[in-house]
Image (spheres, helix red, strand yellow):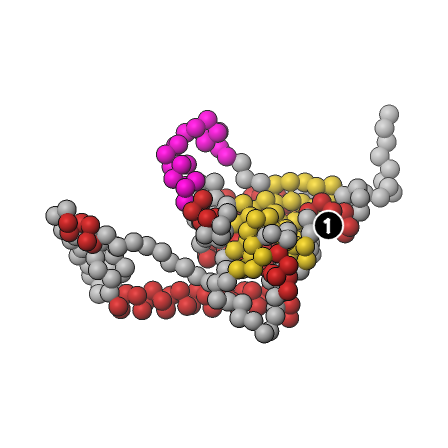
Amino acid sequence: MVRLNPFSKREKTVAVVRLSGVIAAGSRGGLSDESLAPLIEKAFSRGKPSAVALILNSPGGSPVQSALIGARIRRLADDKNIPVFAFVEDVAASGGYWLAASADEIFVDRSSIVGSIGVISAGFGAQDFIARHGIERRVHTAGKSKSMMDPFRPEKEEDVARLSSMLEQIHEVFIDHVKTRRGAKLAEDQDLFTGEIWVGQKAIEVGLADTVGHLVPEMKKRFGEKVRFRRYEQRRSMWRRFGASLSQDALAGLEERASFARFGL
């Protein structure tokens, strides 16, 4: 009969949470606070881990969802006194970098892309197209600011000014988060908040990352050769596995590829 020795030294465990994809509320297969909450909560709570490691590969997305996910990570890390390490794969840009900055240390590959600390709003204008096809746009509102940036009407200067003000406010929140999390590590002689991106060693030099390193060897250095890894990642539902909603999945896939393509990936 095998007996457990209560005095034996327990092997240390690192909970590994994969955060891969575009950040958006209600996205199919993407990252949102609602979809990630059970994983993140379990990662910090199950088996008293020595650390939580975030595997990051995200071009960004919703600033609100980024903030909610990052806040959840920090709240649990502080409440349970568990260190958090971020390991960037291909890219952690924009909202992806927000998540990386929620960790205590950021590791990158020599070719990882990080940064893009800015805010973007993209749309289209189709007023000439519908006019050529004899289509009339009819919009009725109560409140002069209710209809803003209508893609089927000519762009208005006051709408652009209003949108720019909104983007600037969100940008300031992003900057504050990075400064709060990275502090004195940030290079003082460079403007890091223009939306620019950095690769590998350059990201380390400007203070947006700490060092080059990969999950397994780095965690073994910290917690010993026998450290165990407990992995958590989002799973597709049974319907998605068997091909349900193929059109929606295809569209979501195209949107995600377009987001990664902005960084040449």
Indicate the amino acid at tag 1: Glu
Residue 254 appears in the picture as rendered: yes
Task: Please state if 263 lies on the left or on the right of 214 as rendered.
Answer: left
Q: Is residue 206 above or below residue 110?
A: below
Q: Main secondary structure of the magenta part?
A: helix
Which range is magenta? Answer: 236-255
When the figure is inspected, residue 88 is found, relative to residue 195, above or below; the finding is: above
Tally of marks: 1
The spot of residue 82 in percent (x, y) is 69, 54
Binning the other alpha carbons within 10 Å of mark 1 as few (below 14), some (14 to 19) or many (20 upward) gives some
Residue 99 seen in render: no
Q: Is residue 78 above or below residue 165?
A: above
**Residue 63 picture location, percent across and down:** 46, 57
Q: Residue at x 68, y 48 (%)?
A: 214
Give the residue drawn at x 48%, y 48%: 260
The quadrant holding residue 243 is top left
Asked whether 207 falls inside the magenta stretch, the response is: no
Please state if 58 lies on the left or on the right of 216 as rendered.
left
Q: Nearer the viewer, residue 109 or 174?
A: 109
Residue under numbered circle 1: 218
Where residue 71 sits, quadrant-wise, is: bottom right
Asked if residue 241 is among those painted magenta in the image, a careful observer would answer yes
Q: Residue visible at 43% across and 61% down?
A: 119
Give the percent coordinates (x, y) of residue 165: 37, 69
Under tag 1, what secondary structure? helix
Residue at image point 60% right, 73% down: 188
Q: Residue furthest left?
A: 134
Choose between 108 and 15: the one closer to the eye: 108
